[in-house]
Image: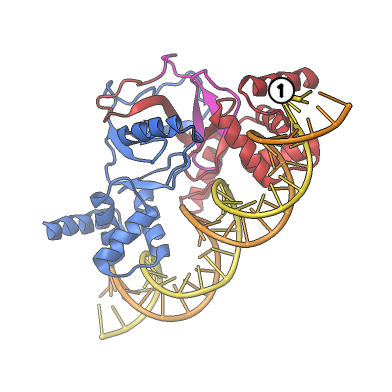
Chain colours: A red, B blue, C orange, D yellow
Amino acid sequence: MPSSQSANHANLLRLHGLHVTAQRLAVLGAVSEMPHGTADEIQELVRAEIGTISRQAVYDALGTLADNGLIRRIQPARSPARFEDRVDDNHHHIVCRDCGLTMDVDCKAGARPCLDVTENFGFAIDEAEVIYWGLCPACQKSEKTVLSKSNPSLPSLP
Amino acid sequence: MPSSQSANHANLLRLHGLHVTAQRLAVLGAVSEMPHGTADEIQELVRAEIGTISRQAVYDALGTLADNGLIRRIQPARSPARFEDRVDDNHHHIVCRDCGLTMDVDCKAGARPCLDVTENFGFAIDEAEVIYWGLCPACQKSEKTVLSKSNPSLPSLP
DNA sequence: ATCCAAAACTTGACTTTGTCTAAAATTCAT
DNA sequence: ATGAATTTTAGACAAAGTCAAGTTTTGGAT
């Protein structure tokens, strides 16, 4: 039901006092279709859906949506920013150091991890972001191959 | 004792099988002088110390040092990469959403937080990175000022 | 229904951060 | 001292994102 989906999205936008535009609906739709997508990937999806959109509009929409809490922006090291529509549920991410593959994980603890810090330096802390770094199954395999060929051991993100 | 400092650094480099060069020593020195510095800031410090260095050499040195575990690279969202020489001690960071100010914190728990995840998708996880997001004391103040002037509420990093 | 001010979008140049390549210089084991 | 391998330099290039000015769209008020 894509139509009820976008009706939903339209309401979400109104709820936050944002104008409802084709671009924003398409961006919001793309982010939920492709969790952890980059701005570029989102843009491609959006173009597939509404034909055309400027790069600036994609960035504007992503920025506005993120600023208003409709989506979340994560930015793992050496990777462009990624976006997802799972918000307000305290989940974290596993990111592959090699290919950038990103998966959602929940903490075993369930609650927010380590919200209390020994010293907060007067900061008003509102979020604890956790990224687990490692190698995904596929990259573990190719890492072995690569090492056996005595290749440089340091991969870069795509 | 800057000389014993750099002798130390030279040994560190040798220990990791890296050539000892003036540039690497200066970069290593700059990173310890200015924890959480960006590549640009490091470059300025290095130039102040050894007069001249190419941008590429700064990036090469930072990359090599990070790859070999002599320094750590962190990359908060919407900020360029930052570097520090505190490694192997499992500390985390508080980052100001507004100005990017970064401070070190230890977890109350002491041990690595949330190392166990409910589902690891076959990833070989080797690190849990935690960033606490919030506003530093200075930006809390200016945020109030800004809001009372009904300004756009969304700041950007410097 | 129409109008209008504010919000959003487009376009294209620009900035920042970082990488690639080839040539020159340096390091360090012999 | 010598020479092979590693580093550094210089300058072009690339990716990701931002700025600014002008145009279009939205949605509330007539």
Q: Quadrant of the N terminus of chain B?
A: bottom left
Q: Is residue C24 above or below residue B90?
A: below
- Asked which quadrant contains residue B109, the reply is top left
Q: Nearer the viewer, residue B114 or B136?
A: B136
Q: Is residue A56 visible?
A: yes
Secondary structure character of the magenta stretch overall:
loop
Q: Is residue A96 above or below residue B24?
A: above
Q: Is residue A77 above or below residue D22?
A: above
Residue A153, position in %: x, y?
46, 50
Magenta residues span A83-112
Q: Nearer the viewer, residue A58 or B143?
A: B143
Residue D5, position in %: x, y?
40, 67
Report the residue at 19% width, 59% height from top: B6
Q: Nearer the viewer, residue C25 or A54?
A: A54
* A116 sits to left or right of A59: left
Amino acid on which disc 1 is placed: Ala
Q: Nearer the viewer, residue D26 or B49?
A: D26
For mark 1, what is the residue? A10
Report the residue at 26% width, 68% height from top: B50
Residue A156, position in %: x, y?
51, 49
Q: Is residue A131 visible?
A: no
Q: Is residue A29 above or below residue B7?
A: above
Q: Residue B145 lies in magenta, yes or no?
A: no
Report the residue at 39% width, 30% height from top: B144
In the picture as drawn, the residue positioned furthest to the left comes out as B1
- Asked which quadrant contains residue D12, the reply is bottom right
How busy is the neighbourhood of tag 1: few (under 14 within 10 Å), some, or many (20 plus)? some
